[in-house]
Image (cartoon, helix red, strand yellow):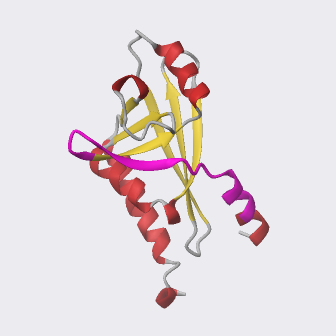
Amino acid sequence: MTSEEMKQMLERTHKDLDIFDFNGKNVPRIMLPDRRFDEIMEKIYGKAVSVNTNLNILQDGIGNVFVEVSLDFSYGDIHEEFLIYANESLEFFESLADTTMLALSPPQHSEVHQDKIFMVQLPKPERAINALDIIKNGLRKKLPNNS
């Protein structure tokens, strides 16, 4: 990956991420703009919804690892994609592998309220665990003693 390609990838990354305590578990959270979160909630309110979650791992072979998280909702024709720079978000993916849950919410809700959060249970937990292994292996290539 050239430095220009790396710069472009970094510009595309979603940076509004954190980890929050949900019933004693550290759950990774992707924050959406208020308006987008409300649009999604309006479309799925009162519906039985499943979310197909994919983790596509992109790496350059020298220790830079990106993960494209795609969410396809079963109702409302909703598709969301988030490019995450795993080098700076390892804890996010460790929590994802541990809890196999992901939360969506607007950014200003540091005290997460039940009506302002949407929880996604990963349908195939082993994918998050496998993704974490791939991420960690990719990141090892960036360590100084491996260069």
87 vs 34, nearest the viewer:
34
113 vs 72, nearest the viewer:
113
Task: Tell me: 22 left or right of 10.
Answer: left
- Quadrant for the N terminus, please: bottom right
* Residue at the image position 74 percent from the left and 58 percent from the top: 8
* Residue at the image position 58 percent from the left and 20 percent from the top: 39
Q: Which residues are magenta?
A: 7-25
Outermost residue to the bottom: 145
| 41 versus 26 height, above or below | above
| 43 versus 6 height, above or below | above
Task: Tell me: 39 left or right of 105.
Answer: right
Q: How many marks?
A: 0
- Quadrant for the C terminus, please: bottom right
| Residue 10 pos. (x, y %) | 67, 59
| Residue 114 pos. (x, y %) | 34, 26
Whether 24 is among the magenta residues is: yes
